[in-house]
Image (tube, grey):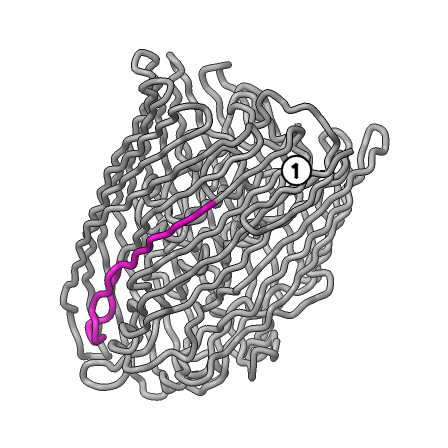
Amino acid sequence: MRVRCLLILSTTLVVTLPTTAWAEDPYPTVESASEADGVIVVTARKREETLGNIPVSATAISGDMLEAQGINSVKDAARLSPGLNINSDGTGRAFVAIRGVGVTLVQSVQPGVGLFIDGIYQPNTAYLNNPLLDVARIEVLRGPQGTLYGKNTLGGAINVLTRQPGNNLEMRAQGDFAGPDNAWLVSGSISAPIVNDTLAVRVAASHRQQGGFLTNVVIGGQANPFNTDSVRATIRATPSNNMVLTAKGYYDWVNGANTPYSRVNSPQDYSRTVQFNALNRVSYRYRGINAKLEVPNEGIKSTLTLIGAYDARSGRAPDNDTDFGPLNIARSVTYDELRTKTGELRLDSKWSDTISSLFGLFYSRETTAARDVTTIVPAGLVRTTLRTTKADTYAAFGTLFWQPDGAWEVALGLRYDHEDRQAEGAVTFTDTGGVLPDARIKSNQVEPRLTITRYWTPMLMTYASVARGYRGGGFNAPTAPVRTYKGDSVWTYELGTKYASVDHKAVLSSAVFYNDYKDYIGLNSIAPAEGGGLVTVDLNTGNVESYGLEFEAVVRPVRAWSLQGALTLMHARITDATAYTSVTGRVLSSNRLTFQPDWSATIFTDYTFDLGGSELVLGADLTFKGKRLAATLNQITPTFLDGYMLANASITWRRGPVEIAAFANNIFDKDYFESYIEKTTLQLAGLPASDLGITGDRQRYGVRASLRF
């Protein structure tokens, strides 16, 4: 035995491995890569590459890992990726941030982290709560990804890739049940060839529901139930000359609760009782269809890819208590529609043994329509708000890859985005009011990226990159002191390294980064309204600086035992809040970013016992998160949420295609807050004031079974 010590960007890890001869290529090619050997193929740069070879800070989570961990949503999968934080305060709302930036409490603000399903952009982050169905892999890309993925990826991008049909007949079925809130899931998929090597189809469906752990003590019943049904269908055709046409359709029915906040006295008051006088139920319907055509041309050593997609979301909240209390003060009825059409054309070419390129064009149109009727019951005042928006985005992008020899790669990319957004609407107060003045935003942005990669040995590579990212702006109410707010941008600088031992018993990666954000779009706030009173506004808070370290490791001391871990250390602070004060007339009580911890970590392990014809797997994981700033408009005293640790464990028996597991989540029944709003917000709105909080899930325990062949 011999010990190898590897120093990776100020992080020292000592790994004991058996002495073996170097393999000719410990980073296998895409064609020879095997997940069973610890090698994962990703599409982070919109071409298939092995994860260990790409100069991007990225995490790939396989579908099998998601199922083994009992993870049913992207939100739950966030703990497996360093630098990624996702929390939620309702069925249709999710707040996502990578490296501290991207979070928002309102749907009207464009996300700072791009979400893609099979490479197709999703403009709304609510999907992060939705069930994962028949997923092959989740790729989390940290840092600006504008060169290939476009605007709204200044924090990073999340790409969910579903399983594709092929020549083999494949069937999967899974079910689990957990208490004490009667949480259960059933799902299944079937894939089969219609004509070998020519036409194949895959169909998947699932049902998930849970009661939740919050109780309405005013009118009774569960305050945060969740119920979903999903269906997917994919057709893959390869008619000739390696041409591939893939078409997919999907439909999701999602029913749950809207912002089920409890009135609490402090961040240590983990109340699970909600005092609403309405059920606050909300329902969403997601459906869409997309197609991708891939046409290789050996004559010019290029592949042409054409993508088209149509996605729709419809939301309905028929009766909402908007004062968060037991008294019948304010109620609302809301409806909204979101429609998105996208198209992308790209050409991936290999010009020589040393030069290749990826060029493309992109277009999207997003249209929204929303109707909100709010009633102030004591005054008999009814406010009806109608809003419509239309957004067109045009982009051209390209990246040149130069590999002068096997030891170096230089990638230079550039993307140009043109955005044109328009807003219309009307507001009436009982019998007064009328049409709102139109508003419009146009922007032209250039997002470059330069990456230099050095492959020191077949086992070790390092890279350095500099990139710019951009997020689009939006609109406020006409009575706000600012009708529009502009987009924010970032320059990021990153150094990273990746290492894999010859036998892949140790796979390590780390990165250090520095981000300089301008015109950061922060949480919504309160500002003086024209004509008197206050109005809610979205705005550019100011400038933000963040820097830190990310580290991931997978180690197999022996064949039966694996250890995996991820660590993020991050310092993200607002450095200039002048813009916030000039709009609101208020100051911030902290320079921290809302809900973003300075550190987080995950450790998970499993050990497999060979039972002769079957195996028994013991698994456990720990998730740590440091203290976080709550959402607050208090100008003097900031409110912080305590850090916490969650522990999960499972025992799994496997024999052939059958797998049965018993599991427990949040073993120690740890209390923690998923979301928190300090009372100043209600005070400024003239409502009975208290802090508002949503606690995370309590201890769950249950069984899970799966069958695949």
**How far across and how far down the image is residue 680, in percent?**
42, 83
Relative to residue 215, is residue 629 drawn left or right?
left
- Which portion, as a residue range, is magenta? 473-495
**How far across and how far down the image is residue 55, in percent?**
45, 38
Relative to residue 241, is residue 269 drawn left or right?
right
Task: Answer above or below: position of 390 versus 628.
Answer: above
Task: Answer above or below: position of 610 versus 595.
Answer: above
User: Residue 215 lies in what quarter of the image?
Assistant: bottom right
Q: Nearer the viewer, residue 164 or 17?
A: 17
User: Residue 375 lies in what quarter of the image?
Assistant: bottom left
Residue 475 lies in magenta, yes or no? yes
User: Which secondary structure, mark 1?
Assistant: strand
Image point (60%, 56%), residue name: 601
Q: Nearer the viewer, residue 535 or 214?
A: 535
**How far across and how far down the image is residue 191, in percent?**
55, 27
Residue matched to label 1? 506
Query: Label 1 is placed on what type of residue?
Result: Ala
